[in-house]
Image (cartoon, rainbow, N blue to C red):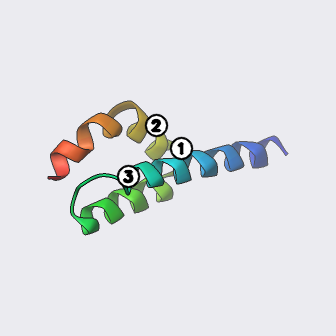
Amino acid sequence: MIGFIIWIIGLILAIKAVLEIMKWKVDGVKKLLVAILVLLTSWIGLIFYYFWGRDNLPQMLK
């Protein structure tokens, strides 16, 4: 039961991250690839996105 709750929290955070990624003014393919990587890597992708990627990836992908 606790594992399911943790999974739901991760899913909600991943969807929130993908919605933020889709607002970037970057090429559509690059946005899609980053969004898929965040979703596929679950918690590791979320940690990477929230601690480093949110500030640095939009500039790197331009």
Vertical placement of 12 versus 31: above or below?
above
Left or right: 58 in relation to 13: left
Along the line of sight, which residue is nearer the eye, 57 or 19? Answer: 19
Nearer to us in this view, 4 or 53:
53
Q: In the image, residue 26 lies at what x, y percent?
A: 22, 57
| Total numbered circles | 3
User: For the residues marked 3 and 1, what is the alpha-carbon distance in whole angstroms?
Assistant: 16 Å
- The answer to which image quadrant residue 29 occupies is bottom left
Q: Residues within 10 Å of mark 1 (few under 14, many from 20)?
A: some
In primary-sequence order, the first of circles 3 and 2 is 3
> Label 3 crowding class (10 Å Cα cut-off): few <14, some 14-19, many 20+?
many
Q: Secondary structure at mark 1?
A: helix
Res. 43 mark: 1
Q: Amino acid at mark 1?
A: Trp
Circle 3 is placed at which residue position?
Answer: 21
Mark 1 and mark 2: Cα distance apart in space: 6 Å
Report the amino acid beneath label 3: Ile
Q: Residue at x 71, y 42 (%)?
A: 6
Q: CA distance from mark 3 to mark 2?
A: 14 Å
Q: For the residues labelled 3 and 2, say whether their Cβ atoms are less than 8 Å apart.
A: no
Would you identify the image quadrant in which residue 48 lies? top left
> Of label 3 and label 1, which has the lower sequence position?
3
